[in-house]
Image (spheres, coloured by chain):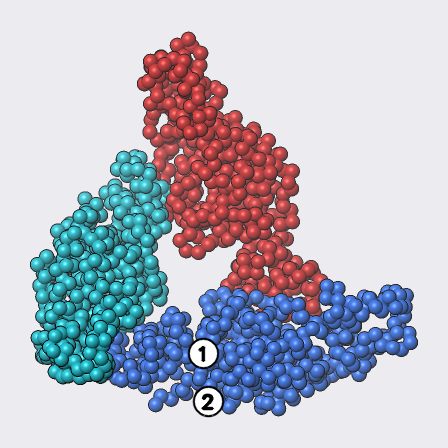
Chain colours: A blue, B cyan, C red
């Protein structure tokens, strides 16, 4: 028996995981996440009930790459109230009503003056937008256009509004969490999901849930060759802090994915790695495409661009890590994006389950990849004499064996075989296992 | 005068060769070919009447690469008979009725039990399939579904059938034949056709005939730079035996083609070389495409796959020879494939003649290729002063001269010129000859 | 402040230059240009009134590359006359009536015999063709088919025609002119327009005018990094003479364009450089495409071929200069080409102005290109802290900054950024300037 673990592709997750995933999203949505602070910590605690999370706290003021870890933001209460004290919008009802990281205010002003601090969506008048101002000190409230119009009709532009933001920015720390599923080697697959958006379900409670359940299943499954690391960190500054802290170990990252918006009803979209876009597809780029092909799901592939989520940081030219991005509908391309409509209805159990299936297949494709040397490279080896026609069950398995034998010249990998032959990655890997057992293949890269 | 032979493209075969080719196919079809034995030898004898064939016999039991040369199979008689002795199917009528390489049997059993040994084509009920079992000892008969149904109606499932296979597997040898058309150099163009299928006209009597007549014409034509070798060998084991015996000389093979199914009415299909598929088209891949372009014939180009005919062996990773495959309709893609309908009606004189034309053009394109250095590379040389406008007859010839001069920088070949300019290979070669005579070109690769 | 000049793209020429350009074309059309002689000199004098032209005279008989400088051709009068002395066609009316470089004749012959020396366009019966015979001594007249038919109806085939070509070929010189706009470096952008066609407006008075006004504007504009050289020379022999004389300095040419037919109403057509066609697009190939993309104009891109205008000489394999060709409608593809209909009506002020705009944008794209190193390559640098969100005005400028930072790894240029990001070259260059000022970029190639 070879030392390599058997192909675990057969252990793909079942469909009824959709409900489990949706329940976890529902648990995460109410938590008041921000780029630092207790909402973020509560989120990591909730995930830590499912998987062993290693938590890191990076103190306020710590220099991280070109940035500095910001203070924590603590809100006790925040609202707008009419002259009679009745509240127009209240942070207690939804964290979306307050611009994230707003400075403290206790004031009173006519609606006319307040408007400069109000954010609405005139084209989606019933929705509340999500706004932040992390690096420019200011304050503001978010509300629906309908609510604003009603207020204006009620009190007029000269009507006084009371503004209360009982908040403070204090020394503290930035928190991130990691699950590590140890493999046979230090070669690492990095999965990363941003954990800073409050209230929004698809962006990004969906990915926190999917990544957590994936990690749980990987922990419970057979040992892989790769170590898999799942990172939950606040967007931008969290990735930057993590990169700063792990600078010496980044060479271990062989493949990576930023995960976002994994719960909506749209199809999958993949954003290629930086190097894959500039040169030629990397294994992660190819594994995503192959996994989707094998699952029979369409995939919208887009080239790398230095905008978007934390792939921006992973792909900065000094790091240039092989990290792509998997989403269903990308940010900004669904109307509910960054609004109060990014809620539990937008996120579908079946979509969450399919995202989990896809990630599983991607991890298996990457982990099962490898290069081999054909030990009988002159002419075809006689498969029948070795009993291989029996163990290679069916024409696809036999074709896979011929392809693997032909391309096992030390230059081509099993992903190459899967791409060129059109055969499923799992079939190719299984054929390679049979051929290795029969002594016709020797791995050249492990 | 340069040492190179004049472009012989003008000597292309005439059309009336179609009848000659069809007559040769008709002569070959009745011979009872197998992977070894006298039917194969008779086939080579028939070809040897047209061209000087060097015959090689490789004894039974000889290890060849990962395989062993099998015994010869001798059949004296083989039939199925009713209880009254009348014959249901008889090998004497067609070799297709007996599974090739069947072991000896003399038995009697009810139709019900016999069915496990009967092969029909339910979807093509009037045709007899072609079946073999070279490497798993068994026996069987092939017949039309109609004949089987009629028998069942006549005698019922309990009706007794007499089985006679008076055959033996004996020590002997595997036979292959080669024609060599010597060229000015040892650089070799290899053409290979499998010679093991009995009774079938398109697969592969057609290619035996076309390759033989091509060899005859090459022998009678002007000496080429390349040596051309035409190999007639049984499929798989024949190619393997030949590769084993010629291992030391394979480096001479610069270009090669496996030939099959060259007689049906379908268009041409080309399967690329292994390296051409993995890297970039090789000269043989390009010459086939250019020859068809110049002849005005469509070409269906397919990538290499380690399935099919003997290109599997030539392209095994240890050899990785630059051998493509030319067919008209590929195996398995015409309904008559491996059935009794692959007969003399399927094979058309015009198709055979066109296949010969195509092969001629391919060989000439390969042989006429070369790299040159422009001796006046700074600006255009003045062609008029050298009388070249007169010898370069017409705008195509003049354009070809400009292209050859421009690309003759030591990096580009005449095939490059033909591809980039869109001008016929023969026009390009003729222009190069004129320019070489005028001292404006010097060959750099001979 | 960096040493580099500010991006001058904002100084693009205004639209009302169309009238100025058309007036210059109108001034050039009547001059009786040829590959040598006074018409050519008068043309250069006219251009020299707008820009400082350096004139070179290469004496008759001088060997230039594989050619020899021809004699000058001087025509005093040339006509065909009826028996009564009335003129059928007269060179005094249009130089097109006489085959350029015709030898002297004073003779009389019946129309029947004269026909061998008459050139008409039967398919465009009202137009006079343009014909030359520079390298084969002969003579001929050009006229409309209608005029010829009328003559034949009038005098019959036996009618006598008087032929007068009072011309001589004398020792003299070939003339070409150059404007040089000095830049900060010797790296050169070469623009070349042929100056030998008499009477024709689009081919090539249009390009002489556009290139002259472009040179004037470059002389009046801010200093560029590149030196720009504009060459006005007769076709073929002029380019060959210039190449011969400048052989030692050709290494300075970083980018080049042959200019022709820049005044007709058709869209732009670009013919790629030789190396760009054979290998991968060169900066000039890419700059032309980007400039047109940014201007919102369609571009028909064609691969290099060793036919056409003087790109043939610049791209001969010994030189292989990075010179493409920009035209509106290419030669031979508009019905007025090389006929009396290539006149001032064919050439449009708006087309001439757009050609000038395009060339300006191309020169700016080439001159503004460069490679940089991101000084903060680990993660994104914090732009807000450096006040860059203010100076990078708008989302396109900010995206450009992210792209430039991400691709400034020493391998990618600003043209790469413009291509990959889809952002205008000028926006990318401006972002790079801001980032360089902020210390986030350091140029690596100057």
Q: Can residue A353 be seen in this view?
A: yes
- Give the residue displayed 28% in from the left and 45% down from the top: B427
Looking at the picture, how far across and down is residue C42, in whole percent? Answer: 51, 28
Image quadrant containing the N terminus of chain C: bottom right
Q: How crowded is mark 1: few (under 14 residues within 10 Å), some or many (20 or more)?
A: many
Q: Do the residues labelled 2 and 1 touch (CB within 8 Å)?
A: no
- Give the residue displayed 51% in from the left and 84% down from the top: A14
Residue A51 relative to residue A40: left or right: left
Residue underneath mark 2: A222
Looking at the picture, how far across and down is residue B301, in whole percent? Answer: 33, 60
Secondary structure under the numbered disc 1 in the rendered image: helix
Looking at the picture, how far across and down is residue B354, in whole percent? Answer: 23, 52
Q: How crowded is mark 2: few (under 14 residues within 10 Å), some or many (20 or more)?
A: some
Residue A365 badge: 1
Q: Are labels 2 and 1 assigned to the same chain?
A: yes
Corner quadrant of residue A88:
bottom right
Q: Which chain does tag 1 point to?
A: A
- Give the residue displayed 52% in from the left and 62% down from the top: C412
Seen from the viewer's position, the closer of residues B98 and C393 is: B98
Image quadrant containing the C terminus of chain C: bottom right
Secondary structure under the numbered disc 2 in the rendered image: loop
Looking at the picture, how far across and down is residue B51, in whole percent? Answer: 10, 58
Seen from the viewer's position, the closer of residues A361 and B127 is: B127
Q: Is residue A121 above or below residue C238?
A: below
Counting the numbered discs, the total is: 2
Seen from the viewer's position, the closer of residues C115 and A322 is: C115
- Give the residue displayed 34% in from the left and 42% down from the top: B399
Q: Is residue A127 above or below residue A215?
A: above
Q: Which chain does tag 2 point to?
A: A
Looking at the image, is mark 2 or mark 1 earlier in the sequence?
A: 2
Corner quadrant of residue A354:
bottom right
Q: Is residue A193 visible?
A: no
């Amino acid at each position: 028996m070879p030392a390599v673990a058997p192909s675990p592709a057969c252990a793909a997750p079942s469909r009824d995981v959709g409900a489990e995933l949706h329940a976890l999203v529902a648990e995460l949505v109410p938590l008041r996440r921000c780029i630092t602070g207790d909402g973020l910590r509560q989120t990591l605690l909730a995930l830590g009930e499912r998987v062993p999370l290693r938590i890191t706290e990076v103190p306020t003021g710590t220099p991280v790459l070109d940035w500095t870890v910001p203070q924590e933001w603590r809100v006790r209460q925040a609202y707008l109230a009419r002259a009679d004290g009745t509240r127009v919008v209240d942070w207690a009802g939804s964290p979306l009503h307050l611009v994230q990281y707003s400075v403290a205010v206790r004031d009173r002003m006519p609606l006319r003056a307040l408007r400069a601090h109000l954010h609405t969506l005139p084209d989606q008048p019933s929705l509340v937008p999500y706004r932040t101002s992390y690096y420019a000190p200011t304050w503001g409230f978010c509300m629906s256009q309908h609510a604003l119009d009603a207020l204006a009709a009620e009190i007029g532009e000269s009507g006084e509004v009371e503004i209360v933001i009982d908040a403070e920015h204090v020394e503290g720390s930035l928190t991130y969490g990691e699950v590590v599923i140890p493999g046979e080697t230090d070669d690492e697959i990095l999965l990363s999901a941003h954990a800073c958006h409050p209230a929004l379900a698809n962006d990004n409670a969906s990915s926190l849930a999917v990544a957590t359940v994936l990690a749980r299943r990987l922990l419970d499954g057979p040992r892989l060759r790769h170590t898999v690391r799942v990172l939950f960190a606040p967007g931008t500054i969290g990735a930057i802090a993590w990169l700063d802290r792990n600078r010496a170990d980044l060479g271990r990252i062989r493949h990576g994915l930023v995960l976002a918006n994994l719960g909506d009803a749209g199809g999958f979209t993949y954003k290629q790695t930086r190097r894959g876009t500039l040169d030629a597809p990397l294994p992660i780029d190819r594994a995503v495409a192959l996994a989707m092909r094998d699952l029979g799901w369409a995939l919208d592939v887009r080239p790398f661009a230095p905008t978007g989520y934390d792939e921006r940081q992973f792909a900065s030219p000094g790091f240039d890590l092989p990290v792509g991005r998997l989403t269903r509908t990308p940010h900004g391309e669904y109307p509910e994006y960054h609004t109060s409509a990014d809620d539990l209805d937008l996120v579908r159990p079946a979509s969450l389950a399919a995202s989990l299936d896809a990630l599983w297949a991607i991890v298996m494709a990457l982990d099962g990849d490898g290069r081999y040397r054909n030990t009988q490279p002159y002419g075809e080896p006689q498969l029948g004499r070795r009993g291989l026609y029996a163990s290679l069950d069916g024409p696809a398995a036999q074709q896979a064996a011929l392809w693997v034998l032909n391309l096992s010249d030390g230059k081509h990998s099993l992903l190459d075989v899967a791409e060129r032959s059109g055969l499923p990655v799992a079939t190719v890997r299984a054929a390679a296992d049979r051929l290795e057992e029969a002594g016709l293949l020797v791995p050249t890269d492990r």
